[in-house]
Amino acid sequence: LIRCQSTSTEEPKTRNPLDNASNLLTNLLSGGNLGSMPIAEGAVSDLFSRPFFFSLYDWFIEHGSVYKLAFGPKAFVVVSDPIVARHILRENAFSYDKGVLADILEPIMGKGLIPADLDTWKVRRKVIAPAFHALYLEAMVKVFTQCSERSILKIEELLHGKKTVELDLEAEFSSLALDIIGLGVFNYDFGSVTKESPVIKAVYGALFEAEHRSTFYVPYWKFPLARWLVPRQRKFHKDLKVINDCLDGLIRNAKETRQETDVEKLQQRDYSNLKDASLLRFLVDMRGDDVDDRQLRDDLMTMLIAGHETTAAVLTWAVFLLAQNPSKMKKAQAEIEQVLGQGKLTFELIKQLKYIRLIVVESLRLYPQPPLLIRRSLKPDVLPGGHKGDKDGYAIPSGTDIFVSVYNLHRSPYLWDNPNEFEPERFLVKRDNEGIEGWSGFDPSRSPGALYPNEIISDFAFLPFGGGPRKCVGDQFALMESTIALTLLLQKFDVELRGSPEEVEIVTGATIHTKNGLWCRLKRRSDVH
Ligand code: HEM
């Protein structure tokens, strides 16, 4: 039973981030002094009969935007308020770490940016963020286009001689995103749209384990000898070795052909003539960054995992939503024809694909990836007040586990009109009082020139890539990739769901995905030749 938590005045027993199984168990047994915070009560069936974030939403409506969830003896604070989210993610960001998430991901990503301790993170973030510069993103347009065209060719071949073809588009998007991330991050062509290979199988194996760990409460993988005794752990370590060997080979090659240069010069390279525009090339060639191979491998592995399923999920849910809204699909296709005609997609043209871009962000609003951001306080803090039960703000002790529910923020009835409706146009509504074209209720002047609505414009009501110093480094990469893949798909095909929307069951781990695939019926568009 998820039950009432006593409001003890004792400090929690565990104050430090967890670094071993016994710590985690101790932490599970500790509560926290969270004062007069409302408390969610429910049954375990709430957690297992449907995705966890659905229950967190119901409790948000019932208890307000900051509440305590007691799960057995363990308490979590669930945040669904933009000001509190901004405080935790941006204003007081360094008073928090990734808590249980780091524990889950460290065996896979090592000291990569997501689970990294603060000292490592500070060094690596400074090195990695400049690698996503404007010319790199522009060069990626070619990679996004070529990979998407491979997927489209595959569908056309399946359609050969037929009027329609039935396909699990979630699986197709997953292959597409894997191919793109491989080329963009380390110039390796998985070619997974058309083939299977031991490396691809290993990547999926490792992802599957990462997902399983993120939904499992006890870190079984940390028990002594688990690595050798538990079959799924043995397989996991075998998969990791296959990926690591592949990455080590790529790092070796890149280092053998190193051309050391200053960051500024690297950012001005002639990308149109570069054979290898990848992040790995940039990181290896960067003067002054003599990073060891192990750290570099952790960085690559982190980006491989962070940038793969997330983007595949955005495309999956965008198609799911469009398939239920044929008039919006037609509107998108009309924009594509008007902007592209039969011509090639370029970086400049993406700026004109306004409606497609809004479809991408609206899909991220309704299906944020991941639906929750996880933090643990490293020291006592006071959350901004003004909430039910505590006007002055809740005092939280060190060691408090927090879920910032992006799903709740994005569907909050207090922040959005018709929060559960798919309305890409919502971001364009004119603000009557000021007579300027802006995003509804938001202020575009906060982030001039932004191609996509973001957390700054919305003041943390919309945060698909998080916010503050730990914000996603790949946000523009992912948004452009999704915009291009969706554009090229809709240019060629009409898409409808094979069954009813209800048959597409939602499950969740690190991302929100379907239980049995997104089965769609695709047909060549009659007005495209
Ligand atoms: C962090 C979302 C694509 C690399 C994050 C965070 C979110 C996010 C919400 C913040 C996590 C937190 O605060 O706990 C997404 C979504 C994507 C996407 C929705 C696709 C639509 C990518 C891509 C890459 C990437 C393509 C790399 C090529 C990273 C990294 C971090 C991160 C390295 C950690 C940043 C840090 O802690 O400094 N992502 N991401 N992501 N993402 Fe993404």
Image (spheres, rainbow, N blue to C red):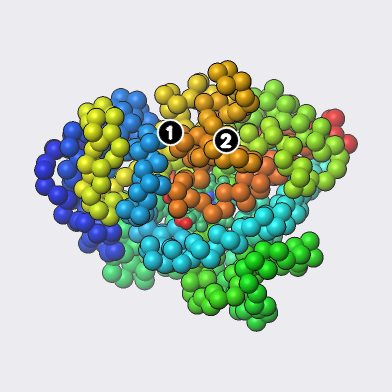
Numbered-mark total:
2
Q: Could you tell me the amino acid type at mark 2?
A: Ser
Question: How far is the residue under mark 2 from the one under mark 1?
Answer: 22 Å
Q: Position of residue 291 (x, y in %)?
A: 51, 75
Q: In the rendered view of the protein, which quadrant contains the N terminus? A: top left
Residue in the picture at 83% in, 46% down: 344
Residue 436 in which image quadrant: top right
Front residue of this view, candidates 148 and 290: 290
Give SS at disc 1. Answer: helix
Residue 97 in sight: yes
Q: Nearer the viewer, mark 2 or mark 1?
A: 2
Residue 519 in sight: no
Residue in the picture at 37% in, 69% down: 227
Front residue of this view, candidates 486 and 86: 86
Residue at image mark 1: 409
Number of the label disc, if any, that sits on residue 445: 2
Q: In the rendered view of the protein, which quadrant contains the C terminus? A: top right
Residue in the picture at 51% in, 51% down: 472
Residue that protrudes farthest toward the top in the picture: 432
Residue in the picture at 35% in, 54% down: 94
Horizontally, residue 88 falls left or right of residue 528, namely left
Horizontally, residue 218 falls left or right of residue 179, namely left
- Please rate how many residues cluster around mark 1, counting C-alpha atoms within 10 Å: few if below 14, some from 14 to 19, many from 20: many
